[in-house]
């Protein structure tokens, strides 16, 4: 029984030592996203309420933060 316990402890240590190291991901920037933007002269639709729009575009994207959200 003691041999099996020793094998369990040794295998746990080896498993912990050889696990892959995870890299921390870098923060995203606005250049990482592909927003459809209108060109000059394109009609801009103003919607009041909820509806489906076939040709949508992004006029502005804001409130982008890179600090972590803490509770």
Image (tube, rainbow, N blue to C red):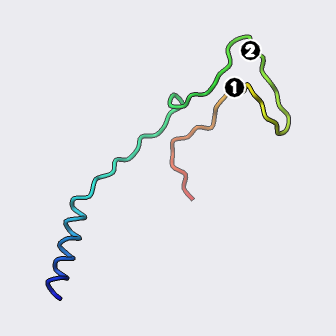
> Tag 1's secondary structure?
loop
Q: Nearer the viewer, residue 65 or 20?
A: 20
User: Which residue, as the protein is rendered here, is positioned at the far bottom?
Assistant: 1
Quadrant where the image shows the C terminus: bottom right
Name the residue rendered at 29%, 52% in the picture: 21
Q: Is residue 46 left or right of residue 24?
A: right
Q: CA distance from mark 2 to mark 1?
A: 10 Å
Q: Which mark is residue 12?
A: none
Circles 2 and 1 in contact, beta carbons < 8 Å: yes
Q: Quadrant of residue 15?
A: bottom left
Q: Could you tell me which residue is drawn at 58 percent across and 37 percent down?
A: 64
Specify the quadrant of the image occupied by residue 5. Answer: bottom left
Say whether disc 2 or disc 1 marks the residue closer to the N-terminus.
2
Q: Which mark is residue 42?
A: 2
- Seen at 63% across and 25% down, the residue is 36
Residue under circle 1?
57
Q: Which element type, helix, strand or loop, lies under badge 2?
A: loop
Is residue 67 toward the left or the right of residue 53 in the image? left
- Pick the front one: 61 or 20: 20
Q: Position of residue 51 (x, y in %)?
A: 82, 36
Q: Which of the 4 image quadrants contains residue 14?
A: bottom left
């Amino acid at each position: 029984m003691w041999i099996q316990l020793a094998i369990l402890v040794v295998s746990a240590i080896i498993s912990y030592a050889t696990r892959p190291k995870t890299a921390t991901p870098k923060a995203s920037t606005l250049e990482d996203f592909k927003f459809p933007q209108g060109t000059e002269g394109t009609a801009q639709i103003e919607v009041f309420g909820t509806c489906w729009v076939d040709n949508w575009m992004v006029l502005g994207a804001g409130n982008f933060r890179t600090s972590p959200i803490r509770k």
